[in-house]
Image: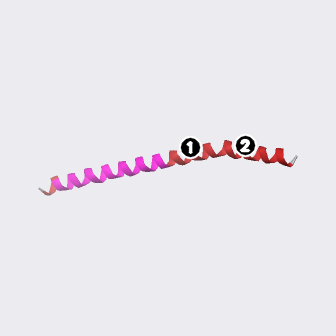
Amino acid sequence: GFASSESVTSEDNDGFKPTQVHLNSNTKEMKSQHLWNVRIMIHVIKIEILMWNQ
């Protein structure tokens, strides 16, 4: 009985891990995309300021 319950928990963990990893990778992608957008915006603003100062 103990061995069978152990196998069930290990199966549950295996089923749980991929979704967790998938969620983590999604949030990482979203964060990096957001950072990239912010960088582009800052770059554009800097160019506009330079243009105005000329």
Real-space CA distance between mark 2 and mark 1, rounded to the nearest whole angstrom: 18 Å
Q: Secondary structure at mark 2?
A: helix
Q: Is residue 41 left or right of residue 18?
A: left
19 over 38 or under it: above or below? above
Residue 45 in the image, given as x and y percentages of width and height:
26, 53
Prevalent SS, magenta region: helix
Percent coordinates x, y for residue 42 in the rendering? 30, 54
Q: Nearer the viewer, residue 49 or 39?
A: 39
Mark nearer the N terminus (2 vs 1): 2
Numbered label attached to residue 11: 2
Q: Which residue does the numbered mark 1 point to in the structure image?
A: 22
What residue appears at the point 36 percent right and 48 percent down from the top-left corner?
Answer: 37
Q: Is residue 39 magenta?
A: yes
29 magenta-colored: yes
Query: Is residue 28 left or right of 11 when viewed as pictured?
Result: left
Magenta stretch in the rendered image: 28-50
Query: Label 1 near label 2: C-beta < 8 Å?
Result: no
Q: Tell me the colour scheme of the image.
A: secondary structure
Query: Which type of secondary structure does the marked residue at label 1 adopt?
Result: helix
Residue 13: % across, % down: 69, 47
Residue type highlighted by circle 2: Glu
Q: Nearer the viewer, mark 2 or mark 1?
A: 2
| Disc 2: CA contacts within 10 A as few (<14), some (14-19) or many (>=20) | few
Q: Residue at x 23, y 55 (%)?
A: 46
Residue in view at x 35 percent, y 52 percent: 38
Q: Amino acid at mark 1?
A: His
